[in-house]
Image (cartoon, grey):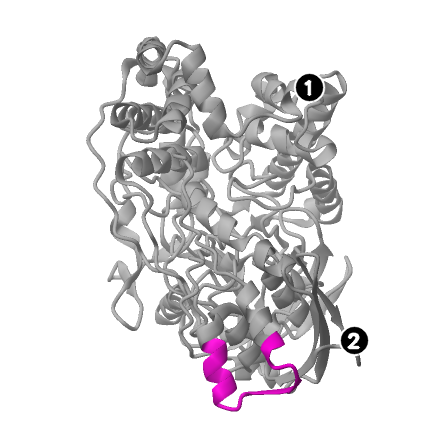
Amino acid sequence: MLSLRFWLGLGVGIALCALVVLGTLSFFGSLIGPMLIAAPAIPVPPVIAPAEATKMSMQEARDLVANDDRKDFEFAERGFIATRSDPIIRRADGGVVVDLSSYDFLQGQAPESVNPSLWRHAQILTKHGLFKVMDGIYQVRGFDISTVTFIDAGEGWIVVDPLTTMEAAKAAYDLVSEHLGQRAILAVIYSHSHGDHFGGAAGIISAEDARTVRVKVIAPDGFLKEAVSENIIAGPAMSRRARYQFGMTLPRGPEGEVTSGLGPGVSRGTISMIAPTIDITTTGQELTIGTVTLVFQVTPGTEAPAEMNFYLPQFRAVFMAENANLTMHNLLPARGALVRDSKAWADYLTESIRLFGDKSEVMFAAHGIPRFGQAEIVAFLKKHRDAYKFLHDQSVRLMNGGLTAAEIAEVLALPSVLAREWYNRGYYGTMSHNSKAIYQRYMGWFDANPANLWPLPPEPAAKLYVEAMGGAEAVMARAREAAAAGDYRWAAMLLNHLVFADAGNEAARSFLAEVYTQLGFQAEAGTWRNIYLTGAQELRSGVLRLPPATVSAEMLDATTTAMLLDFAAVRVNPEKALAQSFALNIEITDRGERVLVTVENGVLIHEEGVSDKAAGASVQITRGDLVKCLFGGSAVAAVIKASGGVTITGDAALFDALVSLIEPVDANFNIVTP
């Protein structure tokens, strides 16, 4: 394992939510041990009352909530055993990882600043504590955005998806031990390759437990590659956008963040990685752990590139990972990602129904709540499947009829037989966002209209729009008329042009913040609410400059050298690179790897397992020192060279030249202003 207790301060500002969650494990903030998500200082927003148009827009949601049969609440509360006596889960340094009391405001009916449907959903998602799903299966919910499951395997526990952070996972295990007795962990299962399903592993087992196979660590085929590779290249941009998706800088409350829509907020602790020791490669593969047999279904390319469900025959229970949720999921997260395949998602749910539907009396998952009864489970899976299939098929039908992404999003809606089911509503992903993702998957960004082939960038376009509309005062007047009429979408478009034409126009910024606030209050999607309210926050207070997070040595160790060099290549300064042309042989001494790095025509190329006798220099270096040099900058590289950590034959200046090409990235860039 690499020794990386070395502060590099690269300024990338990695965020898990993620990040993580989010599947975003963006790399290379500061390499000083386990990844830490710190809470930012949050500015207090001004009090803005919900407008009459906002109140009126929520009437349909009020009617739906008023007619709720409360079945989901019963499922969420069933089997409750206990929760923590102390609602605060802390890091070793005393910092807050989770405050279970922070959602205590979710009582009674929704205030006028929160969509009633989202309020109802948040009440369900934030019920926290230890729950008995059935004899032998227990869950801890509400400690993180995801859930963690404990399955009784006779001699000990099988733990499924150990949350995002070590502290949250340990708190969950402690709660289980307190009420069900102290027992060993026999196995840990990662259902898929997103950080909120493996990041807490080192809080309940050790890497040594896995290496010695005292604890089996089980994951779908391709897990490790996907866990470390997804979002590395675009990590800084994704981490910045994740702040918007998850409301990471918002206050929590009726005027701020009201969950992510998928679960509570992400725990802000220490993220680890313990590599799997057993891969699940095929559907139908079986494992027996202690007294429990598991039958797996692999579902690659659905909610994650590497994902799997499993069935427990002796319990007549099925685990659906993140393929079946309490909400419509994202096909393209607002933070960014490769577009997911809604047709494959629906097809795998069809296979799940065929494999497990008539056998299951209990269904549980990686987020949300269990469902009980064979008929209930099959109905849920079918209608959830049908929502994704309808979304795909009708988006493509309209696309083939000539509608663009924006036009499809404006007219496409689920039929009421599907839309009236709470689990198909858009709390995390939405029909609007997802239909655009399907268009993008098939057609790309261009809508075929020549006017959109070579458009002006936002700032110069905004100045011309404002001029064409008669100047700033005229645009402001039109925006006020639109807002007064409750047309906040049009008001936002007008004011966005005004702000991008003149970022110093404080009146326009303030008014746009008010408009975004009203749109946030109206939103049924937790993600949309967070995005609008974060935009309003940054218009008022500017971009909060979050400190860099850290990356675990285990995660870095699992990252291939090719991935590291890919990340270096996208940070090359082209002006500097165009002025140089050279080749370096690099031998990574502690890994027995050889890499040829060539800089030519402004591009960095790397070839693994290759060396060139004609290269200008040959470098011998450890992997850890290579990482420090490439991402720590010239000063760090000079220190390592002076210490004797690098051996160079040939032109030693070429190694310095390589390091000097790679520049840091500031992930605190502007979004709602130029």
Q: Nearer the viewer, residue 116 or 20?
A: 20
Label 2 belongs to which residue?
Answer: 610
**Which circle's residue, 2 or 1, is located before the other in the chain?**
1
Q: Position of residue 626 (x, y in %)?
A: 57, 77
Q: Which residues are magenta?
A: 636-654
- Type of residue at label 1? Asn
Mark 1 crowd level (few <14, some 14–19, many ≥20, 10 Å Cα): few
Vertical position of residue 424 compared to residue 479: above or below: below
Residue 389 is left or right of residue 632, and the answer is: right
Horizontal side of 188 relative to 128 (left or right) equals right
Seen in the picture, residue 115 relative to 201 is either above or below; the reply is: above
| Residue at the (45%, 11%) spot, across then down | 468
Where residue 513 appears, as percent x and y from the top left, is: 31, 28
Residue at image mark 1:
449
Asked if residue 87 shows in the view, the reply is yes
Residue pictured at 42% horizontal, 22% vertical: 497
Q: Nearer the viewer, residue 54 or 591?
A: 591
List x then y, in percent, for residue 502. 35, 27
Element marked by disc 2? loop
> Mark 2: which amino acid?
Val
